[in-house]
């Protein structure tokens, strides 16, 4: 009996020590918009805290930082001011390539698949061939955002091999809200905006705006738009916390599917948005917009980025860029 009590006591001490070894605060940097909706839901419903407590980590604090551009999220991640970054696929692909022998950034989970629209107020622009020297295209980050990559993929399709950067000289880095304001103001050099939901649909409600391109035309339908990633160092040092984050994202994904009106209200509250709840619900009902932790289309995107010289090495399979938790999923 004494031996058994000693073993149980030692196990409790080890468990407590293990819990103390993991962080008690986890920090997320995310972009703006519906591509990151799981993080909005997790923040409002305290899902990370819930799953961390269930894992024996005690009173954990989750901090969510809305950050306007992928470049700023990458900078915050590499500076150590956030533990997890959430942005478009190209940001993770570049990080994975640049840190494979050091920091080892990898995705923990996919978040969302959605089309990004290239909208314009210039009535003369109907295709990519119609853009001229006086046009300027706002997008989240020049060269490295999902929209920048989709523009290059589309340019290659329209202008031919080796011409993927044909329109890059017209692009301007601008976050989604500022790009929307600039496009609709009529007082800016910005004549087009490659953006994402809900901003693209807000723009199209204006009769002056029309769509030139959907990213799905370049990448293929249902291609993953956004990912959540961390470093190998954080993943290995905080296994319970990392698994709690993944469990929170999976629960948030299920919640979005089952509770559209409540999810719309959460988005509006967290984003401090004045959009109508019905407008957000209509986007959640759009069959082109899906929420899933399983990635799709990553190899196609990464292969293009390698061919275009954006990364040095293309992954052989999508699992190369992911931590092992989802490796058995039917991704691509």
Image (cartoon, helix red, strand yellow):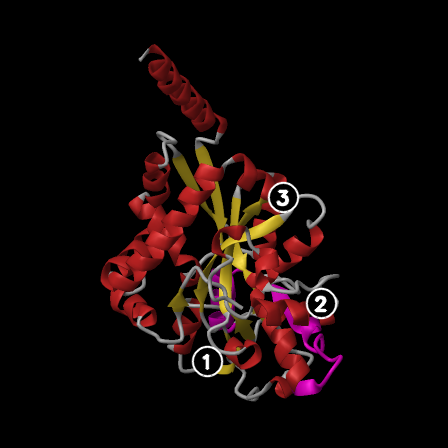
In this rendering, position of residue 119 left or right of residue 128? left
Q: CA distance from mark 2 to mark 1?
A: 34 Å
**Mark 3 or 2, which is nearer the eye?**
2
Q: Determine contact: label 1, label 3, CB under 8 Å.
A: no
Residue 291 falls in which quadrant of the image? bottom left
**Mark 1 or 3, which is nearer the eye?**
3
Q: Which residue is mark 1?
A: 209
In this rendering, position of residue 327 left or right of residue 157? left
Residue span colored magenta: 158-186
Of callouts 2 and 1, the N-terminal one:
1
Mark 2 Cα-neighbour bin, 10 Å: few <14, some 14–19, many ≥20: some
* Residue 306 visible (yes or no): yes
**Mark 2 or 1, which is nearer the eye?**
2
Identify the residue shown where x is 39% and y is 35%.
61
Q: Give x and y (percent) for residue 315.
A: 66, 62
Q: Which residue is mark 3?
A: 78
Tell me: residue 325, above or below residue 16.
below
Residue 17 included in the magenta stretch of the image: no
Mark 1 Cα-neighbour bin, 10 Å: few <14, some 14–19, many ≥20: many
Q: Which residue is mark 2?
A: 306
Q: Secondary structure at mark 3?
A: helix
Q: Secondary structure at mark 1?
A: loop
In this rendering, position of residue 28 left or right of residue 304? left
Which quadrant of the rendered structure holds the C terminus?
Answer: bottom right
């Amino acid at each position: 009996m004494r031996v058994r009590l000693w073993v149980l006591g030692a196990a409790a001490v080890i468990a407590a020590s293990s819990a103390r070894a993991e962080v008690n605060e986890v920090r997320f940097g995310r972009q703006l918009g519906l591509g990151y909706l799981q993080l909005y839901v997790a923040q409002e419903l305290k899902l990370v805290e819930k799953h961390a407590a269930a894992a024996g980590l005690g009173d954990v604090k989750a901090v969510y930082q809305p950050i306007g551009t992928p470049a700023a999220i990458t900078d915050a991640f590499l500076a150590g001011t956030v533990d997890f970054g959430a942005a478009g696929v190209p940001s993770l692909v570049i990080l994975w390539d640049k840190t494979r022998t050091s920091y080892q950034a990898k995705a923990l989970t996919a978040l969302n698949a959605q089309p990004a629209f290239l909208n314009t107020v210039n009535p003369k622009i109907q295709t990519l061939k119609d853009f001229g020297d006086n046009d300027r295209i706002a997008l989240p980050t020049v060269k490295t955002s999902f929209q920048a990559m989709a523009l290059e993929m589309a340019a290659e399709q329209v202008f031919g091999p080796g011409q993927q950067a044909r329109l890059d000289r017209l692009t301007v880095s601008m976050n989604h809200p500022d790009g929307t304001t600039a496009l609709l103001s009529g007082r800016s050099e910005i004549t087009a905006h490659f953006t994402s939901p809900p901003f693209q649909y807000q723009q199209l409600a204006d009769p002056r705006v029309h769509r030139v391109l959907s990213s799905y035309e370049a990448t293929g339908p249902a291609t993953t738009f956004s990912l959540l990633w961390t470093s190998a160092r954080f993943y290995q040092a905080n296994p319970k916390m990392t698994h709690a984050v993944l469990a929170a994202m999976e629960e948030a994904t299920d919640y979005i599917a089952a509770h559209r009106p409540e999810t719309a209200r959460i988005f509006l509250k967290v984003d401090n948005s004045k959009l109508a709840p019905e407008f957000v619900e209509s986007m959640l009902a759009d069959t082109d917009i899906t929420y899933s932790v399983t990635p799709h289309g990553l190899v196609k995107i990464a292969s293009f980025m390698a061919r275009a010289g954006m990364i040095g090495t293309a992954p052989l399979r999508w699992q190369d860029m992911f931590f092992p938790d989802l490796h058995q999923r039917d991704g691509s």
